[in-house]
Image: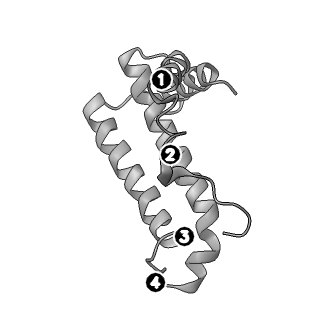
Amino acid sequence: MTLSEAQKTVDTWINTIGQRYFDELTNTAILTEEVGEVARLMARLYGEQSFKRPEEEVLAPNQLADEMADVLFVLICLANQTGINLEEALLKNLEKKTRRDALRHQTNPKLKRKDSTG
């Protein structure tokens, strides 16, 4: 599914099953909440925090995928509401990053690839 197709699919879902979009400010708050849920799982799966119960760790990878999808869904809602074509925006953003960072990352000693010996 392309980003444009995703935007159309979400719009159809919102206008049929969801009835209507929440206002932009509400969706911004929801986006923040969903990003927080991703952050909570990342801190436990890849960071130093631990899960409260061992069984949570088993379910977490699937939960992480679901939470990331929630973030994407709300971001698509906001793009639809504000008239932004995410596919075009992403392509323009990648072009900007390529121009701006063409040499910056390659010459950054902090980003040197580690060989297989570590």
- Looking at the rendered structure, the kind of residue marked 1 is Asn
Q: Are marks 2 and 3 in contact (CB under 8 Å)?
A: no
Whole-angstrom CA distance, mark 2 to mark 3, is: 18 Å
Quick one: label 1 or label 2, which is nearer the N terminus?
Answer: 2
What's under tag 2, amino acid-wise? Asp
Element under disc 4 = loop
- Circle number at residue 70: 2
Mark 1 and mark 4 in contact (Cβ < 8 Å)? no
Disc nearer the start of the sequence (2/4): 4
The residue labelled by disc 4 is 52
Q: Is 94 placed above or below 45 here?
A: above
| In the depicted structure, whether residue 84 falls above or below residue 16 | above
Mark 1 vs mark 2: give the one in front: 1
Q: Nearer the viewer, residue 18 or 89?
A: 89
Between tags 4 and 3, which lies in front? 3
Whether the residues at callouts 4 and 3 have beta carbons within 8 Å, the answer is: no
Q: Determine whether label 1 and label 2 are within 8 Å by CB.
A: no
Look at label 3 and name its amino acid.
Answer: Leu
Q: Which residue is mark 1?
A: 93
Q: Secondary structure at mark 3?
A: helix
Q: Give the x, y percent position of residue 79.
A: 42, 24
Q: Which badge, 4 or 1, comes first in the chain's sequence?
A: 4
Tell me where residue 65 appears, x and y as whole percent.
60, 54
Sequence-first disc among 4 and 3 = 3
- Whether residue 70 sits left or right of residue 31 in the image: it is right
Residue carrying label 3 = 45
Q: Could you say where residue 17 lies in the image, as x and y percent from the top left?
A: 53, 32
